[in-house]
Amino acid sequence: MSRNRAEIIAGALVLAVAAAFLAYGARFVDLGGAGSDAYPLSASFRSAEGISVGTDVRLAGVRVGTVTALELDPATFRARADFLLDPSVEIPDDSQVAISSEGLLGGNFVEILPGGSPFNYAAGDEVLDTQGAVSLISLLMKYVSGTEN
């Protein structure tokens, strides 16, 4: 009888510690992306190599959103990325969206390069000025072979 009671107490203690870790972690990790009041934008890229759903969207190195969908547009054969942005960040409508790399061995992220227009993108708009991912392997092969194409 005392063994069962000890197992129940130990199990309850383990569950309490696990709940405490989850509560602590939830304070520091944004599990919901950019938030429930975030606004959507989209962009299409020639190459979306290195990004996926959940990839950061950054402005001046600061995370301001998350990629929520990535799919191929069968009409244009371009990769379409949908992302949610923090509502406190307003993007001028002449901004550029590029896929950038954190370094040679780092991952890729979506970078917003702001323009100077007084008008901003509205929720659901598509960013037209984009730059796709640059393949480091293809650049290296061009350098080694000495070709420019």
Image: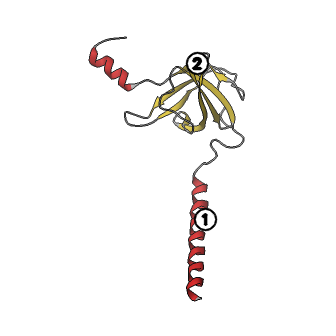
The image position of residue 4, as x and y in percent, is 58, 83
In the image, residue 30 lies at what x, y percent?
A: 60, 48
Mark 1 is on which residue type? Ala
> Which quadrant of the figure has residue 143?
top left
Q: Quadrant of the C terminus?
A: top left
Residue type indicated by callout 2: Asp
Instruction: Please state the horizontal and vertical placement of residue 62, each as a whole percent of the image.
Output: 54, 38
Q: Is residue 4 above or below residue 138?
A: below
Q: Nearer the viewer, mark 1 or mark 2?
A: 1
Q: Which numbered disc flags the more N-terminal residue, 1 or 2?
A: 1
Q: Residues within 10 Å of mark 1 (few under 14, many from 20)?
A: few
**What residue does disc 2 label?**
129
In the drawing, what numbered circle is on residue 89?
none
Q: Is residue 134 above or below residue 56?
A: above
Q: Residue at x 60, y 84 (%)?
A: 5
Color encoding of the figure: secondary structure
Image spot of residue 9 (x, y percent): 59, 79
122 and 31: which is toward the camera: 31
Residue 146 relative to residue 60: left or right: left
Q: Front-most of 144 and 98?
A: 144
Please determine whether, in this image, residue 94 is positioned above or below residue 61.
Answer: above
> Circle 1 sits on which residue?
19
Q: Residue at x 55, y 85 (%)?
A: 3
Q: Residue extending furthest bottom?
A: 1
Q: Quadrant of residue 66?
A: top right
From the image, which quarter does the N terminus lie in? bottom right
| Quadrant in the picture for residue 40 | top right
Q: CA distance from mark 1 to mark 2?
A: 45 Å
Whether residue 102 is situated above or below residue 126 in the rendered picture: below
